[in-house]
C-alpha cells in the first residue's frame, strides 16, 4: 500500500524550461512534506519542505506547492539547469506518534538536456 | 559536507556471513535511522533510534539488528546475509530538540552499496 506516490518514473526537460515533479499521497494524517534530491553514488540531500498550514514554499529556483484537498504536491524548478539532473524523492510525515517516520515515494528521474 | 559518514562505502559478502555497516554523525542530532533502497523503489525504513536507549523496528527489520553505541554512532548488522539483502543502505539523522519534538528534516549519509553473493 503506497502512501506516497510518484507516478512518473522519469521526466526530461530542456535547459531553461520549467520542470514539474508531482507527488500524491493517501494518508490524511500527513502534515509535513519534503523533497529530496539524489545524485548517483550519493545520499539523498534535502531540497525543500512544506508544512500543511501552507500551500506554497519557495527557495530560489525551487517552489513546492501543496493542494491538501487533492492530496497532491508538486515541485517546480525554474529555470531548469543540467545540474538539476538527479532522482527526486517526495517524502511525507505525520504528527503525533508517527512524527519520526518519513514515507518516501519511489522517485522521479529528472534529466535536464542542454 | 561529511556530517554523516558511513563505512564501508562498498561491500561484497557471501551468503551466511555476518556483516556490520557503521554510521557516525557530527551533527549532534538525537535521532538516527537506517534505510535501504532497492532499484526502482523508494527508501524503506529498517530501524530507527530516538536516543541511545531507544531503538525501534521500522518497516523491514527482519534479518537486521542495530546498535546505538553512542549518540553519534548507529550500526546496522546483517546476522546472516542473504542475496535479497543486496541493496543500497543509507543512514540518516534528525534533530528534534530544536523543534520541540516535531519531525525535523532528515540528513543522509552517502550510502553503503552491499552485494551479497
Image (spheres, grey):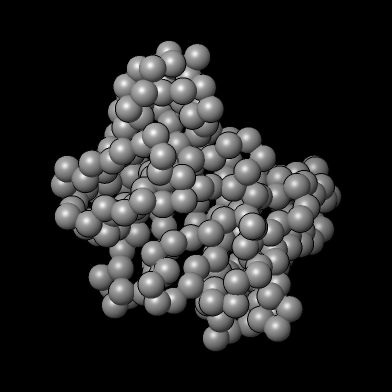
Q: Is residue B63 above or below residue A92?
A: above
Residue at point 70%, 66% (across, down): A24
The N terminus of chain B, quarter of image: top left
Determine the image quadrant of residue A72. Answer: bottom right
Q: Nearer the viewer, residue A60 or A42?
A: A42
Q: How far across and how far down the image is residue B70, in percent? A: 16, 47
- Give the residue drawn at x 18%, y 53%: B52
Choose between A73 and A96: the one closer to the eye: A96
**Residue at the outermost front position:** B62
Q: Quadrant of residue A33?
A: bottom right
> How far across and how far down the image is residue B21, in percent?
33, 31
Q: Position of residue B41 (x, y in %)?
A: 63, 43
**Displayed quadrant of residue A80:** bottom right
Residue A37 appears in view: yes
> In this rendering, would B22 be left or right of A78?
left
Picture coordinates of residue B8, whole percent (x, y): 35, 26
Amino acid at each position: 500500500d503506497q502512501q506516497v506516490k510518484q507516478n512518473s518514473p522519469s521526466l526530461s526537460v530542456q535547459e531553461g524550461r520549467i520542470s514539474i515533479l508531482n507527488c500524491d499521497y493517501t494518508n490524511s494524517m500527513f502534515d509535513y512534506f519534503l523533497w529530496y534530491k539524489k545524485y548517483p553514488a550519493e545520499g539523498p540531500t534535502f531540497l525543500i519542505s512544506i508544512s500543511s498550514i501552507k500551500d506554497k514554499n519557495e527557495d530560489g529556483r525551487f517552489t513546492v506547492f501543496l493542494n491538501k484537498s487533492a492530496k497532491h504536491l508538486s515541485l517546480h524548478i525554474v529555470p531548469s539547469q543540467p545540474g538539476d539532473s538527479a532522482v527526486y524523492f517526495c517524502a511525507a510525515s505525520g504528527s503525533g506518534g508517527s512524527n519520526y517516520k518519513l514515507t518516501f515515494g519511489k522517485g522521479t528521474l529528472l534529466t535536464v538536456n542542454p | 559536507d561529511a556530517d554523516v559518514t558511513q563505512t564501508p562505502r562498498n561491500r561484497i559478502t557471501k551468503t551466511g556471513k555476518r556483516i556490520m555497516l557503521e554510521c557516525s554523525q557530527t551533527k549532534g542530532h538525537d535521532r538516527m535511522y537506517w534505510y535501504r533502497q532497492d532499484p526502482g523503489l523508494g527508501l524503506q525504513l529498517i530501524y530507527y533510534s530516538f536516543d541511545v536507549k531507544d531503538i525501534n523496528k521500522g518497516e523491514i527489520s527482519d534479518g537486521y539488528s542495530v546498535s546505538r553505541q553512542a549518540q553519534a554512532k548507529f550500526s546496522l548488522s546483517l546476522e546472516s546475509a542473504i542475496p535479497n539483502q543486496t541493496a543500497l543502505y543509507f543512514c540518516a539523522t534528525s534533530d528534534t530538540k530544536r523543534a520541540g519534538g516535531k519531525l525535523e528534516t532528515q540528513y543522509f549519509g552517502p550510502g553503503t552499496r552491499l552485494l551479497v553473493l
